[in-house]
Amino acid sequence: MNARIESLVRPEIRALRAYQVPESAGLIKLDAMENPYTWPEALQSEWLETLRGLELNRYPDPKGLVLQAALREAMAIPDEMGVLLGNGSDELIQMLALTLAQPGAKVLSVDPGFVMYRMIGLFAGMDYVGVPLQSEDFSLDLQAVLAAIERERPALIYLAYPNNPTGNRFDADDMVRIIESASGLVVVDEAYAPFTDASFLGLVGDWDNLVVMRTLSKMGLAGLRLGYLVGPPAWLAEIDKVRLPYNINVLTQVSAAFALRHKAVFDAQARAIRAERSRLLEALDSIPGLHPYPSEANFILTRVPAGRAGAIFAGLKQAGILVKNLDGTHPLLADCLRFTVGTPDENAALVRALGGTPARDGPGLGAGNKSAHFGAL
Ligand SMILES: *Cc1c(COP(=O)(O)O)cnc(C)c1O
């Protein structure tokens, strides 16, 4: 490698690979937890009208106050709590790391979990402490988490609720124990809030070290890049200092505020995705050799027969379906694929490609040839 690069770039950065996003043109995209539904025609026209008068020559509102007000109303954010906007929750994770990084400061989460907690911590020079989840159901190992908190004294703790990539939601009492035991800041990451009934949003303020992070991405606005952090104003005032000016662009501010005024559309889509999730789980479960895990998110983690994940991933891609292969990313995810819940047609295509019978076809259809295509993959 170029000697100058070698001497100037930190070894931990040189050792990394840039975040990889696979080519997906022409494929059924079930890899990235996107909402598969678009907007009704009339709503699209109405949205385009809101963009007409925008002055792109001007900087955006630095705090996005109109958007903040729309978020407060749509998401029932407690009045006394602060709101901080990020260019996706990824940017909020970065702001949290920049705020709390100092020599010796650590970030703790559970593994397998969302990789950006560790990555961004590393970018900011924070050591990452990962506590393994329980192997049978990916639940929290509370004693291990509490012991790690005691031992490592992390400045920052992330708990995704529900968790990615496992899809389960941790026990709420365990979460409270962690919040109460932590001397650091606890971030409850509710990226999958649209797909579960549980939330800590109504509890922010109950502890002075709890903030809740959300995003509009999984709800159906991944292209806009908007995340938000809710918590005690004193915390958010510090984190706000490392925010880049104008981090939320004009188009996102106006479009997200518009979308939130029509939240009912997204709520209906989330309900459809939740209903499809049940049907997909059932269909996957009936395919011999597959073990799908229950999910409160918009994806289903599935264990496939040992040593077959790569071949099944490739077979699905050949069949025009892109999923996420998690085999090899963590010992607990050996032989695991992650399927984002798509439209009924997309899910049926997935189930068929796996050799199963889409739930929609009803009982009794094709029970005899469940594994026919599966072997071929
Ligand atoms: C997808 C995801 C995010 C990132 O969301 P963006 O707002 O799109 O950056 C954050 N946390 C978890 C757990 C996720 O799965």
Image (cartoon, rainbow, N blue to C red):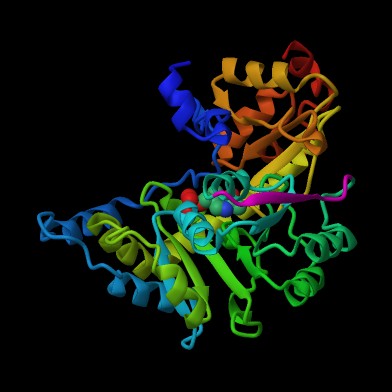
The image quadrant of residue 263 is: bottom left
The residue nearer to you, when weighing 260 against 133, is 133
In the rendered image of this protein, does residue 159 appear above or below residue 374?
A: below
Q: Residue 204, can we see it?
A: yes
Q: Residue 23, can we see it?
A: no
Q: Is residue 129 magenta?
A: yes
In the rendered image of this protein, does residue 201 appear above or below residue 58?
A: below
* Quarter of the image that includes the C terminus: top right
Q: Residue furthest top?
A: 376
The image quadrant of residue 255 is: bottom left
In the rendered image of this protein, does residue 7 appear above or below residue 262?
A: above
Q: Position of residue 205 (x, y in %)?
A: 59, 84
Q: Position of residue 335 (x, y in %)?
A: 79, 28
In the picture, measured across the screen, residue 234 lies left or right of residue 38, that is right
- Tell me the magenta residue range: 125-135
The residue nearer to you, when weighing 326 against 371, is 326
In the picture, measured across the screen, residue 104 lies left or right of residue 61, that is right
- Residue at position x 60%, y 50% in the image: 117
In the rendered image of this protein, does residue 316 appear above or below residue 173?
A: above
The image quadrant of residue 244 is: bottom left
In the picture, measured across the screen, residue 191 lies left or right of residue 87, that is right
- Residue at position x 52%, y 61% in the image: 96
- Residue at position x 63%, y 21% in the image: 316
- Residue at position x 50%, y 63% in the image: 99
Q: Is residue 227 magenta?
A: no
Q: Position of residue 102 (x, y in %)?
A: 56, 59
